[in-house]
Amino acid sequence: MLDANAGPSANGPRRLNRAELKEMRKILEDRRQEVMRNAQKTLGEGIRLDAAELPDDMDLASSEYLQYFNLRLRGREKTYLEKIERAIQRIDSGSFGQCDECGEPIGLERLRVRPEATLCIRCKEAQEREEQQFG
Ligand SMILES: [Zn+2]
């Protein structure tokens, strides 16, 4: 069976076929590259700026400085990169596009917008409601 053809009751999201998985991988790899480029740019600017503020005796290659540099990578970009990496791993392992919570297909439309998503829209909304309750 090559493709899950939508039956009368299968109006919801279906599993991705091979071509769609390939498309997703491309999207993810493009995003990864873009995020890394942006991060490097930001970091590069940070270095030029901060180097002027560093004390004269602090070597740019010193571990202290490298620690500071790594600290800056631990932001939103790093979290996002990790999500992208995980999504690519999920493509390799065959679990991509499957909801972590209920196991149902996440759906192509949602994945095109958020290829790093690990929850289907229903579980995501339920999670957000819970977060609002406790947050
Ligand atoms: Zn779900």
Image (cartoon, rainbow, N blue to C red):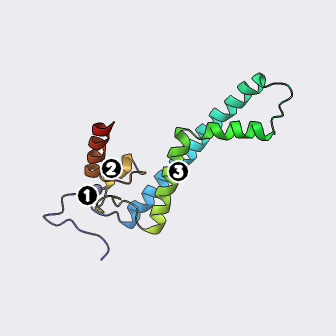
Classify mark 3 as within 8 Å of ligand 1 or not, answering yes or no. no
The residue tagged 2 is 110
Among numbered discs 2 and 3, the one appearing first in the sequence: 3
Residue 125, position as x, y percentages in the image: 27, 45
Q: Are marks 2 and 1 in contact (CB under 8 Å)?
A: yes
Examine the rendered structure and indicate whether residue 66 appears above or below residue 22. Answer: above
Work out which residue is located at the far bottom of the displayed protein and give it: 1
Which secondary structure lies at badge 1? loop
* Dot in front, 1 or 3: 3
Q: Which residue is mark 3?
A: 82
Label 3 crowding class (10 Å Cα cut-off): few <14, some 14-19, many 20+?
some
Answer left or right for 42 relative to 4: right
Residues packed near mark 2 inside 10 Å, few (<14), some (14 to 19) or many (20 plus): some
Residue at numbered disc 1: 13
Query: Which residue ends up furthest to the top in the rendered image?
Result: 53
Disc 1 from disc 3: Cα separation: 25 Å
Q: Amino acid at mark 3?
A: Glu
- Earlier in the chain: of badge 1 and badge 3, it is 1
